[in-house]
Image (tube, grey):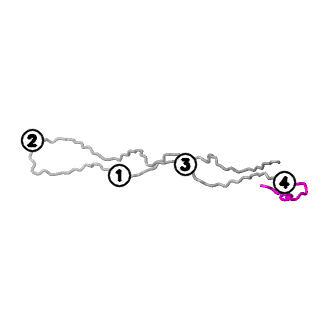
Amino acid sequence: MTEITRSEEQMRIGTERHEAGRVRVHKYVETEMVERTIPVSHEEVRIDREPIVGGEPNPQVSLAEDDHEIILYEERPVIAKETIPVERIHVRTEEVQDEQTVRGELRKERIEVTRDDDVRGEDRGKRGRPST
């Protein structure tokens, strides 16, 4: 008896992890002109005169030059800047499932039995019949 082993290729499909791209997250500073209107106040001099009625002479009061200085104040806008956190960004990757169709040629060995005699019988005389 002769034994012959028939072999064929089979396709095993798997996946490999490869770099598909890169993402760069860059934080930058942008300057924006901002304009706001705020109320401010200032002091002004106002002179109110009031007549003295029935004033009495006072010998200790003499006519003399005299200066008085009054300081006037005003409010001016003051800008103070502070940095405060306003948003938190979470950068993460997410795996997305997809499907791809793969194709490949597979080879198979076939066995063909040919007889050279004229003997006929069951399964005899069938030439070129492949068996799987």
Marks 3/2: CA–CA distance: 97 Å
Front: mark 4 or 1 = 4
Residue contact between numbered discs 4 and 1, judged by CB atoms under 8 Å: no
The secondary element bearing badge 3 is classed as: loop
Q: Which residue is mark 4?
A: 113
Q: Which residue is mark 1?
A: 38
Horizontal and vertical percent for residue 102?
68, 53
Instruction: Report the span colored magenta.
Output: 114-132
Position above or below: 63 against 122 = above
Inspect the image, locate mark 4, and give the three-letter code of the amino acid beneath it: Val
The secondary element bearing badge 1 is classed as: loop
Number of numbered markers: 4
Inspect the image, locate mark 1, and give the three-letter code of the amino acid beneath it: Ile
Badge number at residue 59:
2
Horizontal and vertical percent for residue 97?
59, 53
Queried whether the magenta region covers residue 129, the answer comes back as yes
